Image (cartoon, grey):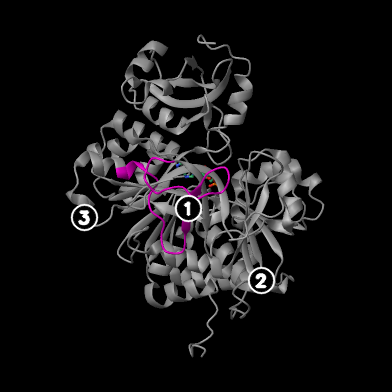
Amino acid sequence: MQGLMQDWPLLVHTVLDHARTYHGDREIVSRTVEGPIHRYTYTDLDARSRKLASAMAKRGLKLGDVVGTMAWNGYRHMEIWYGLMSLGSVVHTLNPRLFAEQLVYIINHAEDQLIFVDLTFVPVLEAIQDKLPAVRGYVIMTDREHMPETSLRNPICYEDLIDEGDHMEWPRFDENTACGMCYTSGTTGNPKGVVYSHRSNVLHSLMTVAGDALAIDNRQTIMPVVPMFHANAWSMTFSCPMSGAKMVMPGGKMDGESIYELLDTEKVYMTAAVPTVWLMLLQYLESTGKKLPHLTRVVIGGSACPPSMIEAFERDYDVEVVHAWGMTEMSPLGSLGVLRGGMENRSEAEQFAAKCKQGRPPYGVEMKITDDDGNEMPRDGESFGHLLVRGPCISQSYLKGEGGRIVDDGNWFDTGDVSTLDADGFMQITDRSKDVIKSGGEWISSIDLENIAVGHPEVAEAAVIGVEHPKWDERPLLVIVRRDGSQVSGEEILAFMDGKIAKWWMPDDVAFVDEIPHTATGKIQKLTLREQFKGHRLPTA
Ligand code: AMP
């Protein structure tokens, strides 16, 4: 027997329809590239998204056409998402921090027809446009008054485009139609295109607004600092309108002072970003003595959140930290460190240890860990293995079949991460499988060592890499950036780490550098570090 419910396709415009109808007066506040703070409501977002879609349809944009965006988090970027996705086009977010050659490859590979660009990034595209023959034009996301002198081919002023549009009724099509695209910055080979569907974005948003996940509701004010060009701003561009939360968009200013200003003036309840952003905010708070009276929760992910950061937020500022993990291929959220009912009766140390892990999957994400031969490993919190995931918002292949088959016969996708799973369902990442240090046949977690080292008050940033060793194959080398003015020695840092880890995990050497290289999404670039320290002679070798 078939169920007798309606066929109501999960299209992303339904999210905005709901926001307009039931939360129409809730605000979206944006720090603009032009300078001033801009405010409007979900009703305005809906109206302008329709005008934009109508203008683009008149200019010939149709179902399946790919359009690039190189933009900060802001209201115009939201309009492009909702307007063009609802029209049936595919919005391809470009990470402006990528190298020029990578951008050229990605834009050509995705076959972007048009690129919407914030004023900040006009020079980035001017420099590469000669290598982008298929791009027909560039829409500059500003008004007439602020249009720059530009060498870009066929520049169009965004506000002129809005003026060209009328009201548009959204077309209906299959919910499995593509609506978004984001390339992963994989460490080997060319970047690969992850393609989201209307269905996967709506489902992912439903999964992540839930109480044990982001727990967003219409009374809250949410500030996604994590960029829309990095994996859907962790779903908040959909889950905020879906739940009616007020949104605060920080634009291009992510330094401690600018972030603090918005948290304070807009009374932000919850915010989310990678650890480096929070490092800047914590340093700003420390140097000014300011507090965070309105902020209740901060979601931290993208790379491992050091326990010292969780402690600082919770102890010094009374802000709950939710440690989250995910991947571009997972839409992106895969797990969140929200404690289970009953855990409040455990000791503070046990609760803290659980919060430091990357957390539990929401409904819609299945997880398991396996050994090198694919055998499932126990969920005992100790055994670590390859982390595999599956679910309706997880990639089954990359654009144009690049990279071949990426799931096994059971539809499991290998995340490339190594982790433990415990009896409470908490997952803890120990490493990227390529970064784990193989010493005498055993694995050492570089993330664990980094987390402990950054807990030292004079350490600004730490990275651990495996360096060749004649007896043990590899041994850990600790690379440190000191805090400004510090002269802390390697011995002092190792003494600080002593007793916090197994003796055989202790780094064999400490090297000091002025800067640790980062990828375009803010992760430590271990490949570059390993090249930099290739041939480094350990004192134990
Ligand atoms: P991306 O697709 O750029 O978001 O990168 C995904 C990768 O980032 C994951 O496979 C992890 O290696 C890493 N990652 C994300 N969140 C965390 C976290 N909370 N702790 C450790 N690694 C993380």
Residue type indicated by callout 3? Gly
Q: Are marks 1 and 3 in contact (CB under 8 Å)?
A: no
Q: Residue at x 58, y 39 (%)?
A: 520
The x, y position of residue 261, in whole percent, is 35, 44
> Residue 55's mark?
2
Q: Residues within 10 Å of mark 1 (few under 14, many from 20)?
A: many
Magenta part, dominant SS: loop
Which residue has dot 1 on it? 368
Residue 452 visible somewhere in the drawing: yes
Label 1 – label 3 distance at C-alpha: 24 Å
Task: Report the magenta residues as a range.
Answer: 354-383
- x and y percent of residue 193 in the render? 67, 53
Residue on which the image places disc 3:
342
Q: Work out whether residue 148 or residue 72 is closer to the camera in this orientation and state it.
A: 72
- Disc with the residue nearer the chain's start (1 vs 2): 2
Tell me the CA gap for discs 1 and 2: 47 Å
Q: Residue at x 30, y 30 (%)?
A: 286
Give the Cα distance between marks 3 and 2. 54 Å
Between marks 1 and 2 in the image, the one whose residue lies nearer the viewer:
1
Of the image marks 1 and 3, the number of the one nearer the N terminus: 3
- Dot 1 falls on a residue whose secondary structure is strand
Pointer 3 and pointer 2: residues touching (CB < 8 Å)?
no
Q: Is residue 241 above or below residue 354?
A: below
